[in-house]
Amino acid sequence: MTMAENMTTHSLAASSVKLPSGKLLINGELVEPLGSANMIHAIDPATGHTIMSFAACGSDDVDRAVKAARACFESRAWQTMRPLDRGRLLEKLALLVEQHRDELAALESLDSGKLLAVTNAIDLQFTIDGLRYFGGWASKINGEYVTHNPLVPEDAIYRAYTQRRPVGVIGGITPWNFPIGQAIQKLAPAIAFGCTVVLKPSEESSLTTLRLGELIAEAGFPAGAVNIITGYGAEAGSALVDHPQVSKIAFTGSTATGQRILAASAATMKRVTLELGGKSPTIVLADADLERAIPGAAAAIFSNSGQICTAGSRLLVEAPVYDQVMDGICRIADDLQLGSQFDAATQIGPLISSRQRERVSSLVETGKKEGATALSGGKSGDGDGWFYRPTVLADVSRDMTVMREEIFGPVVCAMRVEHPADFVSLANDTPFGLAASIWTSNLDRAHILAERIDAGTVWLNTHNILDLAMPFGGSKMSGLGREFGTEAVHAFTEPKAVCMRLEGAGAFG
């Protein structure tokens, strides 16, 4: 199929996608922004055409959303709601998302450029699973009984225990590469553990979060429990971070923005969870099963057009199999079909925006100037959309810009590793520490390497596999804190210690 035919298919599919109203969700109602808000244009990355427009909220809209969340959090009804009933709210929303699954998947694809097969099978499944997973957690939060040892011995008995108490109002700020999944990643544990939420999606992909707001209203969440506002980071995002009634910011996005959030949060001592950038190594040892390792390494970087924080963007290959691995990955890169996210034949869709494509292109050109060789790709794709060819860069060194900075595109930088002892230092020679993968048939080497690599997640003979029960987050410049699993309990609650001196103990001998 030619690109022109591909885009004809795209136009037919895009025209049938159901769009949200564009209204904000504040205090349980779908409302218009205050005053005459500026508008943000949602752009289809495959064509550059405007899908619809929605409000760029200012500080006044943020303020009323936060106040609604705070009023709900402090209300008697919310404070005394049974954890089981908070879990039921999440289950109601899961049922509605399930009912509208195809509609939401199509909307996610149109807005973000993600392949429809991926949004349906992965993004929407993660969303549904996330709601149910944390819905189940809601009734399972327990404190501890503490054996008390008073500093001053006396003839008295003490009893002490801890409670896990919700942090308060959560400001959730989500990225453009996994919009609806990330919204649930912030919303579901917050509600499960008794917090209330103000969500601000990325201005580059807000449509499924706006539609989610409509479903939340339909599900009958208490007024103010979840609020959704849209806008730019510099305005709405900053107002959310700076608001004194927000207790915690849960952010996923770039390291630079995360650093600004961390600095700004100090003024009000907000708690933060920051899931930031990555420059993850994919390590292929000479004893790896190359029939699995080669397509696995390719998928690690080219999936979602490389727009994944855990993308395996640094390929470290043991010398004896370097040429074979490079030949295989280049063949895959050359054969990947670019095109409409709605066409079943498409294997790699567009980047999110023209700005992102310019960034990817600029970094690749910088890599070439510094001595890297583009064995595959290295240029934009055909058509009006923001496509970029899957790119394999060889002849790179650890000091090159492309090896130090997160590109966030379908670009892998490959190094031949002559001495196995160098794998650990090369893998850790990055300011990031989010993820890594190791491809080998030797379990001893796999576990030894996994122990020594400084990353929040290490995959063995696979890559980019997430599980809601497995903690997720990074070290170094990849962020602070963890999400998912039991770590989410600590992310959205804080311990309170209660100690009591028992009177009249002597009356019983």
Image (cartoon, rainbow, N blue to C red):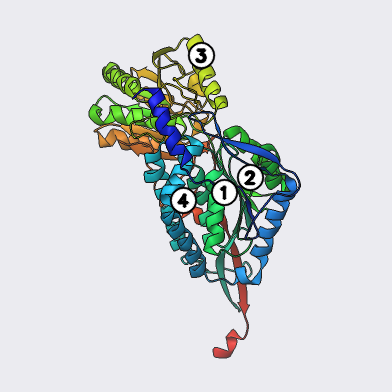
Q: According to the image, label 1 marks what residue?
A: 210
Left or right side of 456 for 148:
right
| Quadrant in the picture for the N terminus | top left
Q: According to the image, label 2 marks what residue?
A: 230
Front-most of residues 131 and 401 = 131
Could you tell me how far apart the alpha carbons at marks 3 and 2 are, in whole angstroms? 34 Å
**Given contact means CB atoms under 8 Å apart, are the residues at marks 3 and 4 in contact?**
no
Dot in front, 3 or 2: 2
Three-letter code, disc 1: Leu
Neighbour class for label 3 at 10 Å: few (<14), some, many (≥20)?
some
Nearer-N-terminus badge (3/2) = 2
**Given contact means CB atoms under 8 Å apart, are the residues at marks 3 and 2 in contact?**
no
Which element carries disc 2, helix, strand or loop? loop
Three-letter code, disc 2: Thr
Residue 365 is marked as 3
Neighbour class for label 2 at 10 Å: few (<14), some, many (≥20)?
many
Neighbour class for label 1 at 10 Å: few (<14), some, many (≥20)?
many
Residue 198 is marked as none
Front-most of residues 506 and 34 = 34
Could you tell me how far apart the alpha carbons at marks 2 and 1 are, in whole angstroms? 8 Å
